[in-house]
Image (cartoon, grey):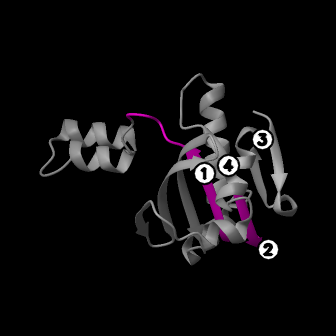
């Protein structure tokens, strides 16, 4: 993948999507975290997810945007105690997708990620990926596949997936 650094190096993007990101104003951390447009899916404690579909000029796009805010103190303490290198959630997901691809496992195509840190703590980060046509988000699949009382075999299967 041919990448380009944007926003003073705080955003890295696949060069192929540069014009679309600029058109959506998602080429800066500020733009990504100000985004409140259509496509809102859900929010979790420190995370928002959006599904962005549309056209800019003649180029269409179908993206997922995942924004991470802040950190949990227990996670910060675990990092300090383990002395493992700190990595924001956005960067970790970006690198994990690349690792899957190197192993020959198809995954959602990464479009961009960005991060802002304070010392070793994550202040905010994000990941934008292309939608996998016909795909099902893992949390939706898990909720459907593993609802109700689960047998030991089903619990083993769920744990293996996680």
Q: Is residue 147 left or right of residue 45?
A: left
Q: Which residue is mark 4?
A: 20
Q: Is residue 159 left or right of residue 132?
A: left
The tag earlier along the polypeptide, 3 or 2, is 3
The tag earlier along the polypeptide, 3 or 1, is 3
The residues tagged by marks 3 and 2 sit, at their Cα atoms, a distance apart of: 29 Å
Q: Which residue is mark 2?
A: 119
Q: Is residue 13 above or below residue 78?
A: above
Q: Is residue 128 above or below residue 96?
A: below
Q: How far across and down, in percent of the image, does residue 106 sit?
A: 54, 28
Q: Nearer the viewer, mark 1 or mark 4?
A: 4
Q: How far across and down, in percent of the image, does residue 10 sit?
A: 80, 61
The tag earlier along the polypeptide, 2 or 1, is 2
Q: Residues within 10 Å of mark 4 (few under 14, many from 20)?
A: some
Q: Is residue 143 above or below residue 118?
A: above
* Residue 145 visible to an observer of this rendering: yes
Query: Outermost residue toward the left?
Result: 149
Q: Secondary structure at mark 3?
A: helix
Q: Nearer the viewer, mark 3 or mark 2?
A: 3
Q: Which residue is mark 3?
A: 15
Q: Residues within 10 Å of mark 3 (few under 14, many from 20)?
A: some
Q: Which residues are magenta?
A: 114-134
The disc label shown at residue 128, or none? 1
**Rendered-image quadrant of the C terminus:** top left
User: Which residue shows up at 43% across the image and 68% down it?
Assistant: 43
Q: Is 18 one of the magenta-colored residues?
A: no
Q: Nearer the viewer, residue 73 or 60?
A: 60
């Amino acid at each position: 993948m041919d990448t380009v650094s944007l926003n003073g190096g705080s955003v890295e993007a696949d060069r192929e999507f540069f014009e679309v990101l600029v058109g959506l104003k998602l080429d800066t951390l500020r733009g990504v975290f100000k985004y409140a447009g259509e496509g809102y899916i859900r929010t979790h404690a420190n995370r928002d997810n959006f599904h962005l579909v549309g056209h800019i000029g003649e180029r269409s796009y179908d993206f997922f945007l995942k924004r991470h805010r802040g950190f949990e103190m227990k996670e910060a303490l675990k990092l300090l105690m383990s002395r493992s290198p700190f990595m924001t959630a956005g960067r970790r997901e970006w690198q994990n997708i690349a690792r899957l691809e190197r192993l020959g496992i198809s995954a959602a195509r990464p479009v961009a990620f960005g991060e802002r840190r304070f010392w070793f703590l994550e202040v905010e980060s994000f990941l934008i990926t292309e939608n996998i046509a016909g795909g099902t988000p893992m949390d939706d699949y898990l909720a459907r596949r593993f609802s109700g009382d689960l047998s030991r075999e089903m619990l083993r299967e769920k744990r293996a997936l996680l």
